Each structure stands twice: as C-alpha cells, then as structure tokens.
Image (cartoon, grey):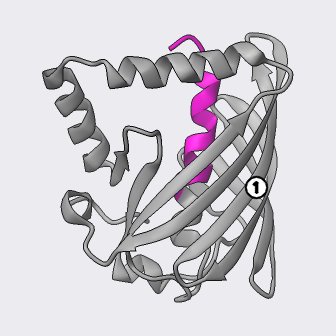
C-alpha cells in the first residue's frame, strides 16, 4: 500500500466498539461497516479500493496467514470490507472513552457525554493526524460514529470523512474470542 496514513483510522474503528458504552452494549461479536471518503485526495480512495482488491485476490496461504494475524489482534475482516471485533464481558463492563485514553499512537481528548451521545477529539502521532468524532448509541445492539480526521500525507494536507455503523452479530465471538484482552 502506498499510503500508511490510511491506517490512522484503525484505532477509531476498533476503539469505539468497546468504548461506546458503560454496560449498555452487548458483549460478543460486533460488525463494523465504514464509509471513508477523502474529498481532497481521490487517489487515497483508489488506494483503499486497490488494497481491498489485493486482499481479496491473495493466494489462499497468504490470506490465511493475514487472517490469523488479524484474529490474534481480535479483528476479523469480511470480504465486503466490514470489520468484525469481539467485545468481552469485561470490556462490556468498562466505562466510556475517557479523557486521555490511548489506542496505538492515538490519544482521545475533550471527551464528553450527553445522554446517548459521546463526542471527542483524537490526536495521533504516527502518522500525525487529528480529528473530531461523535458516537451515538442507538440501543444495546447498534451504534454509529461519524468522524472527520485531518493530517498530512507526503507533505500534502489530507481530510478523511468517516461514517461507521456497528451492529451486534452474536454472543459467540468464535475464533475472535481467543485474543489478549485490551487494556
């Protein structure tokens, strides 16, 4: 892949799943579908499409190895690009995203909650980027997140707009349950 900047969104995609609740979502397998747009950099969208196509066309052994690596991180990827993630009962009991929470190279700041809506800011160091997000908990089995993330890619300003829809799939996480718990 030509642009590592695309991976700046991964912490947001996976952090909000166990974090958008205080025992208000179901523990188990969740599926996250995302729509990511880069209006000022159409080549990034093309790179993402190319990456999905390359993943789809991997030789069986290489695909199996990649899937095993993802499972070891507690993440699965559907052929349609949706991410699957397992929320343990312990994670389902944790508090919401808090000021100063960290995931990979990103720190969450200015986090607030009003009713079923969480708002905050994400500041990442690798690659340097930042953005605002809003997560809305619709019920115990469904939440959505919208985010706008800005940064630099190869010296050029970049803006990504993301919409995410997360839905509970099953109480059984299958192979995704066999991973270390998140801190």
Query: In terms of secondary structure, where does tag 1 sit?
Result: strand
From what the image shows, is residue 107 above or below residue 144?
above
Which residue is most to the left? 61
Q: Which residue is mark 1?
A: 146
From what the image shows, is residue 136 above or below residue 10?
below
From what the image shows, is residue 81 above or below residue 93?
above
> Looking at the rendering, which quadrant does residue 40 occupy?
top right
> Looking at the rendering, which quadrant does residue 90 occupy?
bottom left
Left or right of 170, for residue 23: right
Chief secondary structure of the magenta portion: helix
List x then y, in percent, for residue 56.
34, 25
Q: Residue at x 20, y 64 (%)?
A: 174
List x then y, in percent, for residue 119.
81, 67
The answer to if 179 sits in the magenta stretch is no
Q: Residue at x 79, y 22 (%)?
A: 152
List x then y, in percent, for residue 138.
67, 79
Left or right of 66, for residue 91: right
């Amino acid at each position: 892949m030509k642009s590592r900047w695309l991976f700046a969104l991964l912490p947001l995609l996976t952090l909000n799943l166990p974090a958008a609740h205080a025992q208000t979502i179901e523990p188990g397998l969740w599926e996250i579908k995302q729509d990511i747009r880069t209006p000022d950099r159409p080549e990034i969208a093309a790179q993402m499409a190319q990456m999905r196509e390359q993943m789809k066309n991997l030789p069986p052994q290489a695909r199996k190895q990649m899937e095993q690596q993802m499972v070891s991180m507690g993440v699965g990827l559907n052929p349609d690009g949706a991410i699957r993630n397992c929320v343990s009962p312990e994670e389902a009991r944790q508090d919401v995203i808090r000021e100063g929470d960290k995931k990979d190279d990103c720190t969450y700041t200015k986090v607030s909650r009003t009713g079923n809506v969480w708002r905050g800011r994400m500041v990442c160091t690798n690659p340097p980027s930042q953005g605002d997000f809003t997560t809305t908990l619709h019920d115990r089995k469904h939440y959505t997140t919208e985010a706008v993330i800005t940064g630099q890619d190869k010296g050029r300003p970049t803006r990504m707009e993301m919409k995410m829809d997360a839905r509970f799939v099953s109480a059984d996480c299958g192979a995704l349950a066999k991973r270390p718990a998140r801190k």
